């Protein structure tokens, strides 16, 4: 599927979309941008659940402006990638190992052949957990990994992670894994309003996402299935083990949102304390989608990113944000 662009959300010039096929035969949409002039390497941009490449055009432009090539993909079951269930509005996987296969196929077929090294990852939420899983293995190693609001525990909009895990596991055992949890079918119901939303405090960027959903509803899915929640909570539980953080083979910067209600900052803080080659910081006042937040919050994020990812002259320091762990 080609990239969708419209005046309120223009695609950065030069993007090339392609199809990646995973080891289990799932067709994924990927895209690559290459900056003009000097190149400092490649940032692999890994989105969260229920998102699409188009949502990150602004971020892609900012990375290109820093001299990075950008490679990105839509995870299976969302965006322009193949759906796992007949109902395209349901976001579903049976196991996070499926996302591991997505990332491996993307790296081998899109990023590594077409983009300059070194390779860095910028991963959000679900993408953050997938990237952290990859960074514990030797076959997919980024030089550095930055993750915003990684899915290490469920936030206040959910019951406790342990309770969700038990209920989802029972649901799968009773054959309800494909059941959607009140999935919002994009374009079929009114989208929620800005006030009180748990994603961002920036109205313009929130409205831009709504406009994208209206312009290209086929890219978006609703709430996860019971099976997706069971797979996610199992992956979170695996990441809680002390040997998980100890196995990370690259430096990691975790950036958490101080007002996050989607993922658990307590889980992120616990994880940050176990990091041997990395750190976690919290951005006060930010909601879950840090990269879609207000300009002052995004400026703090980019200062931390520029200081962590090598090569940016005169970058700010992450000390401007409050430290959750060192």
Image (cartoon, rainbow, N blue to C red):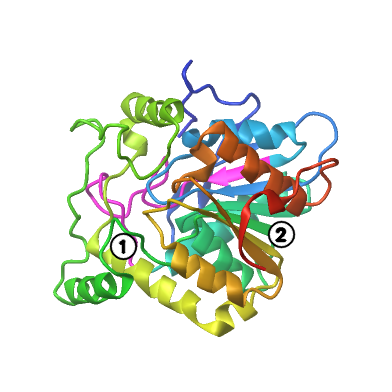
**In this figure, which residue is indicated by the disc labeled 1?**
228
**In this figure, which residue is indicated by the disc labeled 2?**
144
Q: Is residue 249 above or below residue 66?
A: below
In the figure, is residue 120 to the left or right of 260? Answer: right
Q: Is residue 25 visible?
A: yes
Q: Callout 2: few (<14), some (14-19), or many (20+) C-alpha neighbours within 10 Å? A: many
Q: Tag 2's secondary structure?
A: strand
Q: Is residue 23 visible?
A: no
| Image location (x, y in percent) of residue 67 | 77, 36
Q: Quadrant of residue 18?
A: top right
Residue 203 disc label:
none
| Image location (x, y in percent) of residue 196 | 30, 39
Q: Is residue 4 magenta?
A: no
Q: Nearer the viewer, mark 2 or mark 1?
A: 2
Assign the N terminus to one quadrant of the image.
Answer: top left
Is residue 17 or residue 296 the one in the foreground? 296
The residue positioned 47% from the left and 44% from the top of the image is 289
The residue positioned 52% from the left and 49% from the top of the image is 284
Q: Is residue 236 above or below residue 255?
A: below
Q: Main secondary structure of the magenta part?
A: loop
Q: Is residue 203 above or below residue 128?
A: above
Q: Magenta residues?
A: 70-94
Assign the C terminus to one quadrant of the image.
Answer: bottom right
| Image location (x, y in percent) of residue 171 | 18, 71
Q: Callout 1: few (<14), some (14-19), or many (20+) C-alpha neighbours within 10 Å? A: many
């Amino acid at each position: 599927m080609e990239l969708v662009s419209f005046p309120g959300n223009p695609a950065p010039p030069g993007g090339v979309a392609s199809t990646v096929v995973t080891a289990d035969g799932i067709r994924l949409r990927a895209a690559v941008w290459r900056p003009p002039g000097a190149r400092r390497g490649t940032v692999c941009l890994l989105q969260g659940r229920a998102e699409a490449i188009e949502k990150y055009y602004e971020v892609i432009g900012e990375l290109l402006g820093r001299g990075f090539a950008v490679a990105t993909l839509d995870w299976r079951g969302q965006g322009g990638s193949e759906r796992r269930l007949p109902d395209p509005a349901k976001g579903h996987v049976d196991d996070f190992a499926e996302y591991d296969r997505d990332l491996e196929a993307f790296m081998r077929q899109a990023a590594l052949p077409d983009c300059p090294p070194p390779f860095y990852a910028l991963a959000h939420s679900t993408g953050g957990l997938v990237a952290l899983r990859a960074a514990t293995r030797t076959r997919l190693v980024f030089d550095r990994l930055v993750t915003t609001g990684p899915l290490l525990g469920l936030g206040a909009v959910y019951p406790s992670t342990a309770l969700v895990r038990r209920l989802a596991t029972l649901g799968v055992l009773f054959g309800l894994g494909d059941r959607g949890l009140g999935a919002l079918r994009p374009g079929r119901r009114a989208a929620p309003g800005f006030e009180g939303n748990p994603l961002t405090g920036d109205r313009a960027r929130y409205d831009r996402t709504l406009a994208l959903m209206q312009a290209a509803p086929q890219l978006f899915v609703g709430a996860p299935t019971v099976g997706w929640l069971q797979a996610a909570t199992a992956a979170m539980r695996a990441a809680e083990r002390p040997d998980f953080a100890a196995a990370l083979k690259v430096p990691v910067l975790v950036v958490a949102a101080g007002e996050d209600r989607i993922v658990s900052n307590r889980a992120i803080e616990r994880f940050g304390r176990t990091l041997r080659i990395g750190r976690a910081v919290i951005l006060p006042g930010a909601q879950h989608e840090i990269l879609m937040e207000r300009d002052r919050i995004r400026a703090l994020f980019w200062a931390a990113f520029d200081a962590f990812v090598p090569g940016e002259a005169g970058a700010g320091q992450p000390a401007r944000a409050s430290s959750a762990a060192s």
